[in-house]
Every structure is written in structure tokens, then in C-alpha cells.
Image (cartoon, helix red, strand yellow):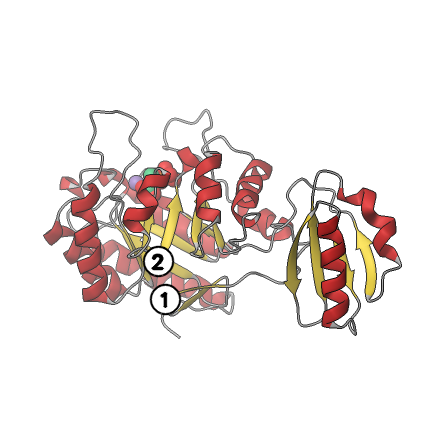
Amino acid sequence: MIIVMRHDATKDQVSAVVSQVEAHGCRTHLSDGDERTVIGVIGTNPFALRDLFIEAPGVAEVVPITKPFKLSNREFRARDTRIMVGAHEVGGHRPWLVAGPCSVDGEELYLETCRHVRAAGAHALRGGVFKPRTSPYSFQGLRGDGVAILREAKRETGLPLVCEVLEPADIGTLADIVDVLQIGARNMQNFPLLSEVGRLRKPVLLKRGMSATIEEWLLSAEYILSQGNYEVILCERGIRTFETYTRNTLDLNAVPLVKELSHLPVIVDPSHGTGRRSLVTPMALAGIAAGADGLIVEVHAQPEVALSDGAQSLTPQAFAHLVEQVDAVAAALNRTVGVA
Ligand code: PEP
Ligand code: MN
């Protein structure tokens, strides 16, 4: 349920409503807009309290949110959420470009890739050090040794880092160096992990699970928001279908649909969404055309020696070309990539 305060409601009236809601055992989340303050009321049956508030001083209306996701719902916050990552405002006018290898697999190659993607116009670096691999015999990431390489890449390029946390213990290892914590597709419904990153005050990139519905995905975002961390960036990375010629089926319906349903920014991962290098740029362009707030793209200085996901990694040259083309599509939509 949301309690919409009148335009002229005073701070004291807002506080009085918040205290009364909390006295009835519900939790509150405030959304301060230019126009009006909205109080989100979360509890098992908040609408039962409706009559208590409908006449309260400063209250304009009390509206149920019928969908199960509440704080991520556009009804709770009408305006797009914008999240600062380094110098870039994710969810703002310019698409956010994150690029780098699937995993950090060696210092020289990682730094070389990072220099290239920075020169091409990337706003943030990616590179996993804790890797969720289907086989226990596959490369699992450099772990602590990889963190030192991430630190060097950030120092050299000045770009923020996006990096996956596989389990709560990884958060401590990464929190002071990484700017955006990624929750991978396989962990989208790891509820203790979601709650844990919800207790941080650091942006979270929440990938869609490979067989998750859009509603399940938004409910996972809700786990993070309901702990007080409102900085969630959603990422469509493809879902499992019967098709075998691609690794996943990139569900671009999700982009405009999530924008209708939610105020959270949504980006596209055309690398995992396709699994094939030749399809990455076309689907990146389609993602931006569909209204995505950015892209996360796997790039490797030598994809043929990459320890994970080489087949879907672009060369630095191909990434530079992708940025030029994305810029052309963005410009056609009155958006631009590149630095402000
Ligand atoms: C990744 O980004 O390297 C990754 C493992 O992605 P996903 O969780 O989408 O499979
Ligand atoms: Mn990968």
C-alpha cells in the first residue's frame, strides 16, 4: 500500500503518519518526489490499516499496490531511479557501458583489455574473480589474487568496477574496491545473499535468473530494496528456451516491460544473452533501441586464450566498433554514449 501525502503536507504530518504505521507493526519506505511524498507501507496486510490513514492530516490518498513487488513498482516511485557509478548516472540520459573480460585471468591481459575498453569509451570495467561455473573442474576465478589485479586496473584507468559476489563471504573481500556488486543469474534467488547486499549502501547489478519470470526477478530486487538499499540496476542476460544455436534467448521484451512496471534502471548483457561473438553487437544495438539504460559486454584482449567465455568475448577492436554503432543508435533516439 502507498500513502500519498498532499503537496502541502508538512514534515511533521509525514512523520506522524510514519510513526503511526510503524506502531501498527508495518515498515515504511519514503519516496520524496518534487511533487509529493509517498510513504510505502510494507506488512502482511497493510491495506487493513487504510481507514486509519485516509482522514489523517496531510494525507491525499491511500492506494493499494496490487502487484507483489512494491518498492520496485512504478506506482511507488513514478520517476526513473538514477544511480551514480563513478562519474556516470545510470538510468539517466546516456547509456552506461560496462566492458571487460568474463573473468580476470591474468594481470597483463586484464590490464591490456581495460586500457582498450577505456579508450573505446567504456564507463566501467567488468571482470569476475569468483566465478560461478557449471563444472567444478572449470576455472573458478583468481579469488584474492584477482582482487589485487582489479585494484591495479582501477588505479590505472580511473574507472569504477563491477564484480560478482557468489556468496556473502565474498562481500567483505570486494566491498572496499568494487563499485557495483553483481548478483549473477544463478544466484538471483539466493535470498540470504540478496538480503545481505540489501544491507549495504552500494549499487547492486541484479541479473535475471535463466528461468526466472519478470515478476520473480522484480521480487528478487524487492529483497534488496526492502533492506534499505535502493540502488539496484537490473540486467537482462537471456533466458533458457528450447533453442540450441544460441546459449540463451535474449528477452528484449523485458526491457520496455520492466520500464513500464518498475522505476529501476535496466541494462542488457548481449554476451551471455547470445553466447556467440558474432551476435553480440547486433543484440547490443537492439537492446539500446529497446530503451535499455546500458550494456555489459565481455571483451578480451586475446579471446582465444580466455579462461572463461572466450567464444562470446569481443576483441577490443570489435568493442570499439560496437561503441561507435551504439552511439549512432543512441543518437537516433536523442541519447548519446560517451562521457558527459
Ligand atoms: C558473468 O557475468 O560472467 C556471468 C556469470 O553472468 P550470468 O550470471 O548472467 O550467467
Ligand atoms: Mn561470462
330 relative to 290, above or below: below
For the residues labelled 2 and 1, the Cα–Cα distance comes to 8 Å
Badge 1 is on which residue?
86
Of the pair 23 and 116, the residue shown nearer to us: 23
222 relative to 17, above or below: above
* Res 142 quadrant in image: top left
Q: Find residue 169 and report its horizontal and vertical position in percent.
A: 32, 40
- In this view, which residue lies farthest toward the left? 108
Question: Which residue is rendered at x = 70% and y = 46% of the image?
Answer: 26
Of the pair 228 and 246, the residue shown nearer to us: 228
Cβ–Cβ below 8 Å for labels 2 and 1?
yes
* Res 75 quadrant in image: bottom right
Question: Can you tell which mark lies on residue 150?
Answer: none
> Is residue 125 at least partly visible in the picture?
yes
Badge 2 is on which residue?
179
> Is residue 274 at least partly visible in the picture?
no
Q: For the image shown, how many numbered marks are present on the structure?
A: 2
Residue 251 in the figure: left or right of residue 323: right
Circle 2: residue type:
Asp
